[in-house]
Image: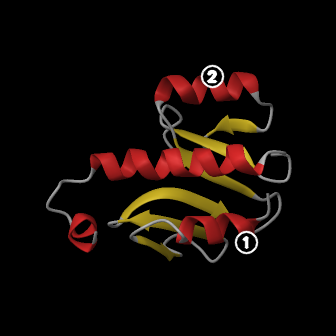
């Protein structure tokens, strides 16, 4: 999966914004100002996604191209090496799972829910 496909998919989700809060090589996707995905724009291309802790470990054991979250809390984040990820549908599901985890943690009175 390429970075433009990841970017387009992230931006198709409701209430998503993108920014460069760290450097010009890391594009961050947020919902209601909470990160759900970090995308490396320099090779090797990768993305960090939030993940249920038990599922995070399982995915790392199952796929060699899924690693503990680089520069993130390794309990809750995985790094996916995009050039090695063969399955677009699976990768999109992990993005959606990350998005859903962050949305579930938002208070009902947040700006995100007011936009829906």
Pointer 1 residue: 4
Q: Is residue 91 left or right of residue 2?
A: left
Q: Earlier in the sequence, mark 1 or mark 2?
A: 1
Q: As rendered, which of 14 and 111 lies closer to the eye? A: 14
- Residue 105: x and y in percent read 28, 47
Q: As rendered, which of 26 and 109 lies closer to the eye? A: 109
Pointer 2 residue: 58
Q: Is residue 43 left or right of residue 95?
A: right
Q: Which mark, by number, is residue 29?
A: none
Compared with residue 75, is residue 29 higher up or lower down, i.e. above or below? below
- Residue 40: x and y in percent read 69, 63
Q: Residue at x 22, y 70 (%)?
A: 111
Label 1 CA crowd tier, 10 Å (few <14, some 14–19, many 20+): few
How much space separates mark 1 and mark 2, taking CA atoms? 27 Å
Q: Which quadrant of the structure image shows residue 37?
A: bottom right
- Residue 15: x and y in percent read 38, 70
Q: Element at badge 1?
A: helix
Label 2 CA crowd tier, 10 Å (few <14, some 14–19, many 20+): few
Please say which color scheme the image uses.
Answer: secondary structure
Q: Is residue 22 visible?
A: yes
Quadrant placement of the C terminus: bottom left
Q: Element at badge 2?
A: helix
Q: Is residue 67 left or right of residue 32?
A: right
Quadrant placement of the N terminus: bottom right
Compared with residue 97, is residue 44 higher up or lower down, i.e. above or below? below
- Residue 41: x and y in percent read 72, 69
């Amino acid at each position: 999966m390429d970075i433009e496909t990841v970017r387009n998919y992230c931006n198709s989700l409701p209430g998503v914004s993108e920014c460069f809060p760290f450097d010009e090589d890391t594009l961050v996707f947020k919902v209601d100002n909470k990160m759900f995905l970090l995308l490396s724009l320099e090779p090797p291309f990768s993305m960090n996604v939030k993940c249920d802790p038990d599922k995070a470990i399982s995915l790392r054991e199952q796929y060699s191209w899924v690693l503990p979250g680089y520069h993130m809390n390794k309990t809750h984040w995985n790094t996916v090496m995009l050039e090695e990820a063969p399955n677009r549908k699976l990768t999109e599901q992990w993005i959606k799972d990350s998005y859903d985890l962050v949305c579930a943690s938002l208070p009902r009175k947040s700006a995100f829910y007011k936009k829906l």
